[in-house]
Amino acid sequence: MLTREETWEKLVRNNTVQGAMPAGAWKLSGADLSGVDLSGAQLNEADIRWARMNGVNLSGAALIGACLNQTDLSGANLSGANMVGVVFVAASLIGADLSKANISNGELGRANLSRANLDQANLSGAYLIEADFSGASLQGAVLYRAVLAGSDLSGANCSEADLSETDFNVANLSKAILTKANLYRADLNAVSLKGADLSEANLIEANLRDTEMGGVRLKGANLQRARLNGAKKLTVAQLNEVKTLFAAQLSPRLMKQIEKEYPNLLTVLAAG
């Protein structure tokens, strides 16, 4: 990790800033840092709005509380960066590497993270409303209690991600990969899951009311106490592959069919 002084000196050498290092938060708004190597830099609470940072190397950097609204970070390397409370509103992070980054409690509303790598990133408590995660990789990522209402996660790979108590209200998760994901108490109300793979997912107490479930794979999924009443295009053929439907809420029509054809799915799972 670079010291603040070393980070400032590097910015001076790249003609990004001039003069002595200021004592307070740095103002780098509108700067051109495209392709600059700032790995391990200290940029906590810096104002970097509207900057050009495509291809910048910020791996292992500290950007705690930094503001990067509308900044272009497409193709940037932010792997392992500490960005707790960072603000990326309407920023472009297309194809960026944010693997293992800590973005907890960050604000990324309307940010474009399409095709970004967020594997094992920590986004717990992050505000991600209307963000674009289409085609992104979030394998093993933590989004506990994150807000993704209205976001686009179509085709995203969220396998083994922690999505417990996450708000996906009216989001697009069509063709998303959610195998072995933890969706405990997740709010998937009015979400499109068309063609998504939820095999072996934990959906205990998940809210799936008014959710589009046409073509969803549910093999081995745990739907104990899940709310499925009102789910659209959900069939018995899908439900007969789940691990359990114990205490789940289903439409009267589906419940009647399950009780008749697969009553074992309505019983409590054996311990272990």
Image: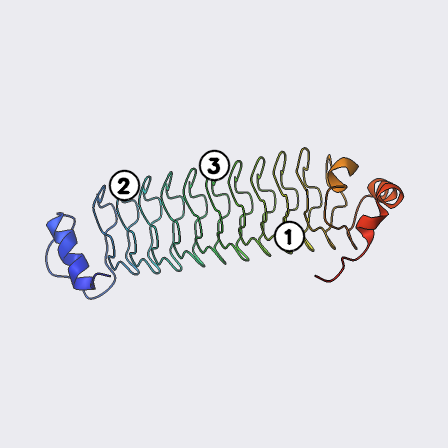
Q: For this rendering, which residue is in front, 52 or 162?
A: 162
Residue identified by numbered label 1: 202
Answer with the quarter of the image where residue 4 lies: bottom left
- Distance from disc 3 to disc 2, alpha carbons, whole Å, reads 19 Å
Q: Which residue is drawn at 30% across and 60% down?
A: 45
Name the mark nearer the viewer: 2 or 1.
1
Instruction: Left or right? Give the position of 180 relative to 139.
Output: right
Instruction: Residue under label 2, please give it.
Output: 55
Query: Quarter of the image containing the C terminus?
Result: bottom right
Q: Is residue 118 above or below residue 64?
A: above
Percent x, y of residue 218:
68, 42
Residue at image coords 74%, 46%: 228
Q: Quadrant of the N terminus?
A: bottom left
Cα distance in 3D space between marks 3 and 1: 22 Å
Residue at image point 79% right, 58% down: 268
Side (left or right) of 223 relative to 45: right
- Ranked by sequence position, the earlier of labels 3 and 2 is 2
For image coordinates 77% across by 41% down, the residue present is 240
